[in-house]
């Protein structure tokens, strides 16, 4: 562990650093709405969600939480909950409706207002540049299959940083690139809805290349800022001690995790993965891996559950996840496994020695209901958060350079292919009226934030 990492973990009596950030996270397409306002261009999620049969109940994000018009109310909620950081994403198509070309002033103005609104409330903004909503015009040029998209992304990053770098000190290039690869291009369950295993390497490489190029652009425009990327990390285990299951779990870890981690921290792709993917000739060009592996100021970790892997047919490329069993499942069918967060954080510390880590997403969907008093008593989510906060504290005690924790999500919102059914929010949204109601879990998260973790013992 580096000297800088050790300096990050001077703990208070509550078990968290004095300057620890407690926040909540959202994403543009999931909350903003105003899909055809302010000069915003069409995205792949607009196209995908308006294609019959792609989203549960054929719902879409046209209105979502109407955050575009209600952001002041939502930021007041952050302040009421004593949260001192907020992670949100910028919609690329609000800035560049066609993904490239001349910036849209109305889009830049909107995000400037958001940043100013956060700073006025004493809340630290964390800006994510890409949370899955590629401009449709770029998809029609090949999307992430096209190397040019990486350069268009860098141009977009530079435009944003030029406008906001004097007020934004934390930038995240991408959210969960492996979900873009597998859900969007292999399984087809998310936009753009393609189904082709041959796209794993090209799309994965171009996403990482775009990250590296964006890091260059951000550091050029905002040299004092901290720049990172967010990865979705499971705790992966084999279904048994059988060698076949152990090998399958190792390959799954390579495909989902080490492809990104090794590239970012070591400048290489894992050999066990490249041997099976058969990278196309000319995909990785001279200088690409050096660009991708530029040092990160932090790594964002999205953690929700673990993945148990069983060996499947020898010819099958994608790992076979064993469905979780038992009572400890969220509304998404995900196993509640808090100790996996501790294990993921320690694995990162030991294998990659990151300078700093943030938990950029963690949370749970449950079938919340309003009681006769108009309140939401979501004891399961309170328990989920308490146990995961405790695992984060345990990781800090073990020397993990963890600097902040963002709960997913501030608001109930459009949950991608599942539409509005799953509710992840600390705040309930009544979609018919757009009324916001702080849940019991929101009040709990607020007490934890206000006491820098002290309320975990209540």
Image: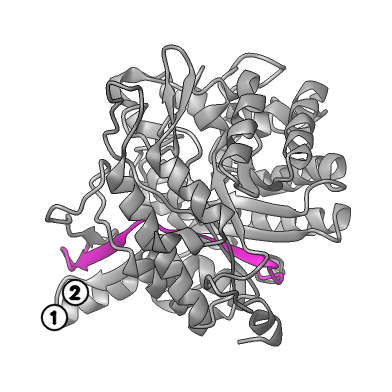
Neighbour tally class for label 2: few under 14, some 14-19, many 20 plus, Cα within 10 Å: many
Report if residue 308 lies within the magenta region: yes
Colour pattern? one colour
- Please state, as top left, top right, bottom left or bottom right, where the N terminus lies in the image: bottom right
Neighbour tally class for label 1: few under 14, some 14-19, many 20 plus, Cα within 10 Å: few
- Which image quadrant is residue 369 in? top left
Would residue 241 be found to the left or right of residue 283 on screen? Answer: left
| Residue 377, percent from left and from top | 31, 37
- Residue nearer the viewer, 420 or 293: 420
- Is residue 171 placed above or below 97 in the rendered structure? below
Report if residue 107 lies within the magenta region: no
- Is residue 175 placed above or below 64 in the rendered structure? below
Examine the rendering and report whether any part of residue 292 can be seen. Answer: yes
Examine the rendering and report whether any part of residue 176 can be seen. Answer: no
Query: What residue is drawn where x is 54% and y is 82%?
Result: 399
CA gap, disc 2 and disc 1: 5 Å
Checking the image for residue 193, the label placed there is none
- Residue nearer the viewer, 80 or 199: 80
| Residue 391, percent from left and from top | 40, 69
Query: What residue is drawn where x is 62% and y is 45%?
Result: 86
Label 2 close to label 1 by CB (< 8 Å): yes
- Is residue 85 placed above or below 357 in the rendered structure? above
Identify residue for label 1. Answer: 242
Q: What segment carries the magenta color?
A: 293-315
| Residue 346, percent from left and from top | 45, 78
Identify residue for label 2. Answer: 245
- Is residue 62 placed above or below 244 in the rendered structure? above
| Residue 131, percent from left and from top | 56, 42
Helix or strand or loop: what does disc 2 sit on?
Answer: helix
């Amino acid at each position: 562990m580096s000297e800088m990492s050790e300096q990050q973990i001077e703990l208070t009596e509550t078990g968290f650093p004095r300057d620890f950030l407690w926040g909540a996270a959202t994403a543009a397409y999931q909350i903003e709405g105003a899909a055809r306002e302010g000069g915003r261009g069409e995205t792949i999620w607009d196209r995908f969600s308006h294609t019959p049969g792609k989203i549960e109940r054929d719902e879409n994000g046209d209105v979502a939480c109407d955050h575009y018009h209600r952001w002041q109310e939502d930021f007041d909620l952050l302040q009421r909950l004593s949260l001192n950081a907020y992670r949100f994403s910028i919609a690329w198509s609000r800035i560049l409706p066609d993904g490239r070309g001349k910036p849209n002033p109305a889009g830049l103005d909107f995000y400037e207002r958001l940043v100013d609104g956060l700073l006025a409330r004493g809340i630290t903004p964390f800006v994510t540049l890409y949370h899955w909503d590629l401009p449709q015009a770029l998809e029609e040029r090949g999307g992430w299959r096209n190397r040019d998209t990486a350069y268009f992304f860098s141009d977009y990053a530079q435009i944003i940083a030029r406008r906001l770098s004097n007020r934004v000190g934390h930038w995240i290039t991408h959210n969960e690139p492996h979900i873009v690869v597998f859900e969007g291009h292999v399984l087809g369950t998310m936009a753009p809805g393609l189904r082709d295993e041959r796209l794993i390497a090209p799309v994965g490489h171009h996403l990482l290349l775009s990250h590296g190029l964006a890091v260059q652009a951000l550091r050029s425009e905002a040299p004092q800022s901290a720049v990172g990327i967010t990865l979705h990390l499971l705790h992966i285990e084999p279904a048994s001690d059988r060698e076949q299951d152990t090998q399958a779990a190792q390959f799954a870890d390579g495909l989902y995790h080490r492809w990104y981690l090794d590239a970012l921290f070591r400048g290489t792709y894992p050999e066990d993965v490249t041997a099976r993917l058969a990278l196309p000739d000319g995909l990785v060009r001279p200088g690409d891996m050096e660009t991708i592996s530029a040092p990160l100021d932090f790594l964002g970790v999205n953690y929700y559950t673990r993945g148990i892997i069983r060996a499947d047919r020898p010819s099958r490329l994608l790992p076979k996840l064993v469905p979780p069993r038992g009572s400890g499942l969220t509304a998404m069918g995900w196993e509640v496994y808090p100790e996996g967060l501790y294990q993921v954080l320690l694995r990162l510390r030991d294998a990659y020695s990151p300078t700093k880590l943030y938990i950029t997403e963690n949370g749970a969907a449950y079938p919340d209901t309003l009681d006769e008093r108009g309140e939401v008593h979501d004891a399961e989510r309170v328990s989920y958060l308490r146990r995961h906060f405790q695992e984060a504290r345990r990781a800090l005690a073990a020397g993990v350079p963890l600097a902040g924790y963002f709960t997913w999500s501030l608001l109930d919102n459009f949950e991608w292919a599942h539409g509005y059914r799953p509710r992840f929010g600390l705040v309930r949204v009544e979609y018919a009226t757009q009324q916001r109601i702080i849940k019991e879990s929101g009040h709990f998260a607020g007490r934890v934030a206000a006491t820098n973790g002290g309320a975990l013992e209540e």
